Structures are given as C-alpha cells and as structure tokens.
Amino acid sequence: MYRTNTCGELRLSDAGKTVTLAGWVQRIRKMGGMTFVDIRDRYGITQLVFNENDNVELCAAANKLGREFCIQATGLVNERESKNKNLPTGDIEIIVSEMNVLSESITPPFTIEDNTDGGDDIRMKYRYLDLRRSCVRKNLELRHRMTILIRNFLDSKDFIEVETPILIGSTPEGARDFVVPSRMNPGQFYALPQSPQTLKQLLMVSGFDRYFQIAKCFRDEDLRADRQPEFTQIDCEMSFVDQDDVINLFEDMARHLFKEIRGVELPAKLQQMTWHEAMCRFGSDKPDLRFGMEFVELMDTLKGTGSFEVFNSAEYIGGICVPGCASYTRKQIDQLTDFVKKPQVGAKGLVWVKFNEDGSVKSSIDKFYDADVLQKLKEVMGAGNGDLVLILSGDNANKTRVQLCSLRLEMGDRLGLRDKNKFECLWIIDFPLFEWSDEEQRLMSTHHPFTMPNPDDIPLLEEHPERVRAKAYDFVCNGIELGGGSLRIHDGRLQERMFKILGFTPERAMAQFGFLINAFKYGAPPHAGLAFGLDRFVSVMAGLDSIRDCIAFPKNNSGRDVMLDAPSALDEKQLDELQIKVDLSQEN
C-alpha cells in the first residue's frame, strides 16, 4: 500500500495514528537537528518532521531531498506546536519513521507555487508541472464538478447522452474546418466537427426527443483569450418545444449551477432583450450589465445645432456618461483618445465634455457649440456635476456603436466596475436571420442555415431578407456569450427557400446536406436546441481572464501546443501513404 491517507485529510483527531503518505516535496526547511518537509498531493499539504536525534540516517536522507521529489513517508500523527492556520492540516505534523524516494526530480523550470515565477510560455511547455499548482488544479476540479452537475441535471430532465462522430464530412458554411486526410480513400478528407449540429437534428428525426453531449468541437479560426481551436460544448437538442420551453429549461440549469458552484441566487426570471435593443443601448449583442453607462443617441442634440462639421455630417452620434470623472486630467483624456484610435477599436477621434463640480463646463468642442446646447446635452445625458461625457460619431451606426461599446468596457475596467464576483445574466433574442459578409459578398446565416425564421417575418424572406428575425437566443453573463441556440427548420420546403436565399443551388444543397434534407422527408418533429461553451462557463465561474486556465492541455494564441510541439510536419512515409505532396520550399 503506497498510502493510507492523502496529504489533505489528516486532522487533530487523527493524532497518535501511524499513517503512510505519498506525494511531491513542496519545500524543505532545516532548523538545527530538525528537517521539515512539506509533502503535497492533489488533496493538500502535510508537514513531515525528521529528527536527527531519533534517526541520523533518515534525517540525512531528508536533507538530500529536492523540490518535486516524489516520496513515500510513514510516521506518527502529532499535534504541531506552531500551528499553521492557513492549511486545513495545519494543526498536525507527521513524525517520520520511514521514508522511500519513489522518484527523483531535476530542478523544475519554475516554482510550483500559486504565485509562480513562470511566464505563460514556459508554463504551457511544462503544463504537466503547471497542473501541480493548486490554483490551476482547482480550475479543473471546478470543471469536473460543473460537468457532473450538468449531467445529473439533464438526466433528471429525461435527456439522453449520445456520442456523435468526430470524423464527419466538411460543411464550409461557417468557420473553417480542420480536415483529416483518409488513407483508405486517397484524395478525400474527413472534417472535424465545428459542432454536432446536423447530427443532433438527425437524432430528433430518430425520435430520441431529448439529447445532450459534452462534445468536443473544432474550428480553424483566429484565436483570442476566449477561443481555442478545440473546445467543449454542452450540446443539447429537444423535440416538440418552442423557444420559451428551451429558455426556461436552460435558465433553470444555469440557476442550479450558479447556486451550487458560487452560492449565487439568480433572479426567478432572467431579463430578455432583443438584439436591436442591445445594440442600441450597449453596442453589443452580449452586453455587460454589471454597470451602467448606457448609450444615449445625440443626433437631435448635436447634429445641426453647432458648427462642428464632424457631427453635422455624421449618421450616428452617441455618448456615455461616466460618473465622477470630470476630474480626469488631460493626460487621462489623451489616453482614452489613443485607446479609441487603436486599430482594434477603429474610431477617428473622441469628443469629451466635463461637467465640473462647480457647475462650469469644459469640453473639446467649446468653440463649436454655445452654452445652451451643452446644457441640453447635460440634460439628455442625465449627467450631474462632476461627470464626464464621452462621445463618438461615424457614418455607420452599428460600427460606431461597437466602437462606443469598447470605450464603455474600457471605462468599466478603469473604474473597477466589472466585478468578477458579481453575475448579471440575460437572454438576447430576435437576432437577424442573415448578415452581410464583405468577404463572401453575399448574405450569410447569422447562426447557421437551419435556424427557423420568425414566423411573422417569413413573407419578407425573398424581398427583404435583411429584415427577417431569427427564432434564436443567446445566454449572456457579464458581457460574455456563454451559450446560444435556436428553433430549427423542420419543414423541407422552408429549408429549400433558405438554401436558395443563401446562394445554394439545389445540387450544392443536396451535395452538402442531402442526408438532412432526405431525413426531413420522413416526419421531422419541431425541434430546437442550445449549446453552452463549457470552457467559457467554467472560466466565468472561476473568475478567469482566459479559458486556457480551465483546460488541461490548451493551445497558445497561435493555436500551437508548445508542450507536444504540434502541429508538426509528417515524415515522408506518412505523406506517401496519404498521397499528399508538400511543397517544402514554402516551409519557414
């Protein structure tokens, strides 16, 4: 038996017991003839004591230990004289009578502590060491707990877990696929699923009624802190339901998770906001409601009421009121101006107005507007003395709102208003069914081509598709989209109309989605679904800035696994078997 107990379970009530522990050496301290060794495993840390007066050889062996040595120690549980209130095991220590070194360790490349000296790159290269840190391990333990809670909740609601294939056909209507060459079918390729979308719809046609899966998904797209080339979805589908049925059930699941994981009671009914309202009020389809600073449209107030040509020629003028920031210095204002001019934001400039505590007004547009207009601005913005108003304008309303959204979030960060221990959740509904793609120069599905149009808007499909709303919904928490879904089209004729609007010929639609089109000929039930991003959900619960910290073996910002050195080149024999030719002259 390697151990009788873990390193995190012994308490004062165990004093006098002989126990055996196994784990890694966290630290060593020598004090006269005594050597103290902290031994660590997944469950915690326990102090071992080696006394030179009791056993010289054993104490000498302890003095030769190094950090991260894997050891086994047997001894007597004893009450500590100097207790450590920061450890659950801090009331006891083990007086060691026997020790075995199970495996030696070279010096780690960074300290295995919560506050480590290792940067992101080195920690990702040695991720198996990084996972020994309690702060990282706790994120994975949280992920595990959430997964168990989700499975049990969905099981209680009659969902059945079904695994769908990882090797499927390519569906180019969306993000780029990862493709896998087939040795048995030269020149042909599988794709890794971006989601199990069509497969779960087929399960509904099969009569499974309620399906879920903790599903691996893959998208070959540009990466950010909340994206990885492979990620995990809580993927669900239901038959014979409408939008309210889906929203109510998964709102209950979210409520259950927040209560169990964070002890937070979500409201009995979450707010629902249309996409159009969210864009007008916050410039985002995933608004952060932890703080105010809602947009105020200023076209009537500032366009044509002064000689500022930038506003007079604008298609949209909007502002936010930042409470208590009229005291901002010129340097701070310049920093904000530089922020909105960054390529990631893309604004041409920033207009500011200070309503000072003494009632005076100072702004960057003083010479263009008289005092009456600025007083009207104060009233429209709901500003008080001591407040700062920040204004952006542009010739594209939605684009300018998105820029103003970036400024609003920046101010929220600067003022400490985005508290990670506060949770504001809502549903966004009534998305546009289509969006224009500058790259493709055509209409594309906002979500996917199987999304049900709002029945009230179906007459607009051919003549005004840009005005058609989708029966789609997103679950948003703290400005992060945690999940989304939609009612699905189950009528073959309506699906054909959708494909036509999206530019599919009947032949192309049949080539790509014939399996689904044909399945719908055999009595498809009305169905709908939703998928939560498990990685994002865990990161929000854990208060993390990046989903990488709750994934066991993540990729870096370039999509590389620096630990496994992947992706990497294949040897020539493998390429020959796949009948793939690689132009080596293009290699870096």
Image: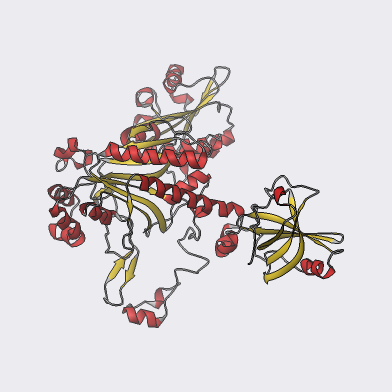
Residues 82 and 517: in front is 82
Colouring used for the render: secondary structure
Q: Quadrant of residue 166?
A: bottom left
Q: In this view, does 458 lie above or below 509?
A: above
Work out whether residue 251 can be spotted: yes
Q: Is residue 161 above or below residue 86?
A: below
Q: In this view, does 571 lie above or below 453?
A: below
- The picture places residue 365, in percent across and down from the top left corner, at 47, 27
- The picture places residue 171, in percent across and down from the top left corner, at 26, 59
Work out whether residue 396 can be spotted: no
- The picture places residue 267, in percent across and down from the top left corner, at 42, 31
Q: Quadrant of residue 485?
A: top left
Residue 494 left/right relative to 579: left
Residues 170 and 535: in front is 535
Residue 494 left/right relative to 319: left
Residue that appears at 30% across and 74% down: 182
Residue that appears at 49% across and 64% down: 561
- The picture places residue 34, in percent across and down from the top left corner, at 83, 60
Q: In which quarter of the image is residue 312?
A: top left
Residue that appears at 17% across and 56% down: 519
Q: Is residue 313 above or below residue 514?
A: above
